[in-house]
Amino acid sequence: MSSEFTFYDYVDADRSGANLINRWLKGDGKPARMHFATTIGLLEASHPRGFNDSVWGRPYVRFMDEDWDGFIELRKEVGNVQYRLLGKVLDRHVFLVTWGVHKTQNYKTDITPQTASDRVNQMIRDPARYRREHEA
Amino acid sequence: MKREQLWESLHDPELRKQLIDEHINVGIAFQIRSLRNRQNLTQAMLAEKLGGKKKQPLVAEWEDPNYGKYTLGTLKELAKAFDVGLLVRFVPFSTMVDWTIDLNKDVIAPPSFSEDQYHITTEMSSILKGTLDVDANKVNFTSSARQESIQTSSSFLYSSYFDAPAKESDKELVHA
């Protein structure tokens, strides 16, 4: 295996101690679970943006702007519901920090962009406590 | 991504179905985009190879991971356009897990026949010149042993194809 990227999940070390991304994928995010597993497997093996064979871009990955500038989003639509995973790419690491659900014009995520940035910083500063290699 | 967790999740039949769906939806879409990129083709150029610019919107749809309605005819046309092979097989789920975890760029966007042929002929040429990059620490492959190995392989190939033991004179021809 030649991995270009590694995806990590945020672990809520200060409260529940749970892998929050995996917990969501096993719960509300279950309809999109294998979509994200397959997509992440492919992205981990793909060249980053700038290479001619890179697939880091739409429709596979969205680079966000405005409040979420610097973050990326993976999406999967099932029925009328759009499931999203949000994270940040730094070098060859992707830090998944939260999820989102878009349904009938309403977008819902559990944290603010500031909290998302704080989580990324925790994952970088204290990897043993706050992050785990992505669990499908 | 961890293999154990992915395997564990497949104890749920709904997730097994999802994995099959997504290997087609996401996997094929990624492969089409990656192959097109690897071969420096625009969507319009690929459409031309497939028979006309009218097909350009279809190419965009095929590259969308939410499309998922590929026919075998379409896949065969794409394989011909990219000049790559196509396998459609029933496999154990462990193979699907391997394909999800152990990916690399050549699996996602495989080389076309001409690139493939270049790799094979280069490797054969290296073997014959004795310059194949073998791990010298693990294999003490002397020049004579390598030559013997080539002769044995050639002999075997000759026998297999012509259903008769290779003769000494034929061996010389093979290695001339």
Image (cartoon, coloured by chain):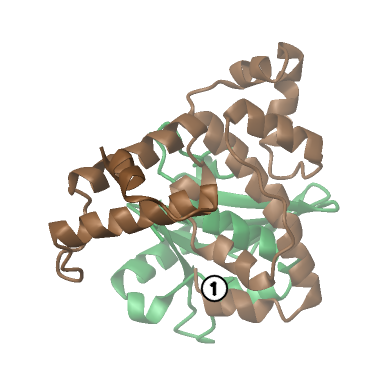
Chain colours: A green, B brown
Task: Characterize the local packing of mark 1: few (<14), some (14-19) or many (20 or more) Cα atoms within 10 angstroms.
Answer: many
At x 65%, y 41%, the residue is B29
- Helix, strand or loop status at disc 1: loop
**Residue at the location (54% across, 53% down)?**
B163
On screen, residue A117 versus residue A127, left or right, reads right
Q: How far across and down, in percent of the image, does residue A131 sit? A: 42, 74
Furthest residue in direction bottom, as rendered: A16
Report which residue position mark 1 lands on. Answer: A135
Q: In the image, is residue A88 above or below residue B58?
A: below
Residue at position x 69%, y 76% in the image: A26
Name the residue located 14 percent from the left edge and 62 percent from the top edge: B142
- Which x, y percent locates residue B69? 81, 42
- Report whether A129 appears left or right of A11: left
Q: Amino acid at mark 1?
A: Glu
Q: Position of residue B106 (x, y in %)?
A: 46, 46
Q: Quadrant of residue A108?
A: bottom right
Q: Is residue A123 visible?
A: yes
Q: In the rendered image, which quarter contains the C terminus of chain A?
A: bottom right
Camera-nearest residue between B55 and B176 = B176
